[in-house]
Amino acid sequence: TGFGATKPQHQGRGYQKARLVREMIDTAALGCRGIHNEADLGGSAISLHNIVRAGFQHLYTKDTYASFG
């Protein structure tokens, strides 16, 4: 679904879930039967929790070999 980030002062307002739901609606309208999303688990699983709550299924956890931050 692409990259998404929320500044700390704007977190907790439901932006990530709204974005994910909108992307699911748009891709379904285009005929897609599946979409992929990734979450950085560095320090918190909040993003993964939001993704699962939006309707995604957690299939695997991959290792991160480089940090971009």
Image (tube, rainbow, N blue to C red):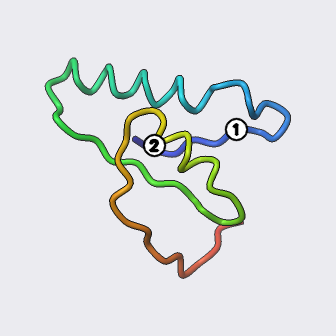
Q: So how many labels did they put on this image?
A: 2
The residue lying at 40 percent from left, 48 percent from top is: 37
Q: Residues within 10 Å of mark 1 (few under 14, many from 20)?
A: few
Q: Which residue is mark 2?
A: 52
Residue 26 in the image: state x and y as whole percent: 31, 21
At a point 45% along the width and 54% down the height, the residue shown is 38
In percent of the image, x 48 and y 77: which residue is there? 63
Q: Amino acid type of disc 2?
A: Val
Between 44 and 16, the one lying in front of the other is: 44
Which is more foreground, mark 2 or mark 1?
Answer: 2
Distance in Å between CA atoms under marks 2 and 1: 18 Å
Disc 1 residue type (three-letter): Thr
Q: Residue furthest right?
A: 9
Residue 17 as seen in the image, left or right of residue 45: left
Q: In the picture, residue 8 is in which quadrant?
A: top right
Circle 1 is placed at which residue position?
6
Side of 34 where 42 appears, left or right: right
Q: Which structural element holds mark 1?
A: loop
